[in-house]
Amino acid sequence: MKLRITWTDDNGANSVQVELTDKQFVIGRDLSCDLVLSHSSVSRIHAVIYKTEQGLFLEDQESSYGTLVNHRPVKPLTAATLNPSSEIKLGAQPIRVSLLTADDTFNMDTGEFSSDRIFQQFDQLRTQVQQAIAPLEESTKQALTESFEQLGEQANLWFERNRVLHHINLMLNHAMVSDDLLAQILPMLVGLFGAERGFVLLHKPRLKKLVPSASYSYDSIHQTQDKPQSSPVNQSQLLFSQTVAKRCFDSSEIYITNDVNQTMLLKSADSVQQGQIKSVLAFPLIYAGNVLAVIYLDNCSSFVDFESHREFIKPLQSHLGAALRHAMHYSQAVTDDLTGVYTRRYFEERVKQAMEHSRRYNSTCCLIFLDIDHFKMINDTHGHHVGDLVLMDVANTLQQTARKSDVVGRLGGEEFVLFLSDTALDGAKIYAERIREKIASIQFMHNDENIQLTASLGVAEYNVAYGLAPYQFIEAADQAMYQAKETGRNRVVVAKPQKVAALNNTCYRK
């Protein structure tokens, strides 16, 4: 994997190309770092970049002045996903990290098209022009200077637009689930269009509704009934934004307003009257005549000229629609047809990657094994159709309860598993109790009869003795779940630390 890292310091513009191996790439002020940055706000060992099968990541090494990735703060010792092109701020030092491929038209070593080289030449030309027009009258100099700056802004916008399209095309060559693709592309669109926040609603034909897939500085879009509700002000904004997105979906057309106060259909909305939302952009992602998703962006602090991007949005829709359809096909291959959660195979891949990360950085993670109580009796008494509905209800409860970083999977039958990253055992037990209570509160009616649902859950914390074998981690939680069954069901049991040798003699049930 090749990266290009660009930054500007007292010596001017700098650019290096890096061949990323299995070894971490270290950035900081210390001379032992792979990339040495001299800015005083950069810590001696500030951050590391590394790759896994899941993608490219940056981790802040408890720096003094913090790290931003695509304008979002990174918690110390926490991995942040890097896009094919990411804007990073180490303290007060901005850098850009771009992924290069063999056919990358932005590859600086080929001597071909290079945005960095062109902008360096543009800066040199600016200096020459300023020298040439120095003898002219002040008004003439000002007019020429403004025209030159406008030309520079247009060139920069053209490069950024094509960079986004290029990265979308790169995503077509990677196996990526739709939620991950949209989570990576959304920050790029927010930055490109000058928005402050946004979200993506993914169309689920089977559910006949739009569901939140990704968000940027708009966390209230992911609210569920068990999470704290936002303030009335935020609720008003959310209702307005969802209404605009729904209209965009229904019409299959781009919706843009630079000033919502000038739009009669919107100016009466509470969030507009209170001056909270000023400019809005929403557009559908369409493939083969079907709307796959809607992207919504807005600004609350100032008015933005979203209208100037209208012509670019059309090719963007085409590129991103194709990439999303490709990702949706992959998502279908790694998700359970009935419940919509991940399959056992994909879940194990994700757990293995997380185990590798925990082992490398001495971080903690947990796994919850869930089995629906008396599920066979439900099938035998009410039929398999009702059993399927129960499985869907339980899976939906798990997905609604899960955090963005959690992974929900189905091993088969009535067995579900949840992986919790950066979660200690005490927190995982509380999490499991919450799930148990929510399942027990499900009101499942069939033929005017209330079918009481309960579940038994086992919780296990990652142990380095498991190595990189997901089945040992899963088996530890499975055995704890068995104890919950044997001690009365409808309860949570935490796995006791045990030697891996004991696990090697067993294998979790198929």
Image (tube, grey):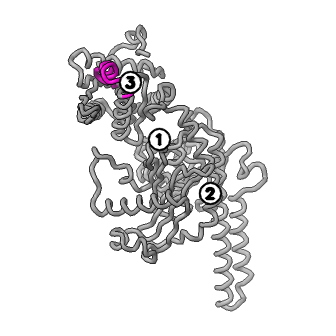
Q: Which residue is mark 1?
A: 206
Q: Is residue 381 magenta?
A: yes
Q: Is residue 303 above or below residue 240?
A: below
Specify the quadrant of the image occupied by residue 277: bottom left
Question: Which segment did they paint magenta?
Answer: 370-385
Q: In the structure shown, which secondary structural element does the residue marked by tag 3 occupy?
A: helix
Q: In the structure shown, which secondary structural element does the residue marked by tag 1 occupy?
A: loop
Badge 3 amino acid: His
Q: Which residue is mark 2?
A: 316
Specify the quadrant of the image occupied by residue 275: bottom left
State how far apart marks 1 and 2 are (Cα).
Answer: 27 Å
Residue in the picture at 48% in, 31% down: 337
Q: Is residue 301 left or right of residue 294?
A: left
Badge 1 amino acid: Arg
Residue 274 image position (x, y, % from top left) = 33, 72
The quadrant the N terminus occupies is top right
Res. 384 mark: 3
Residue 480 at least partly seen: no
Residue 467 image position (x, y, % from top left) = 46, 21
- N-terminal of the pair, mark 1 or mark 2, is 1
Q: Residues within 10 Å of mark 1 (few under 14, many from 20)?
A: few
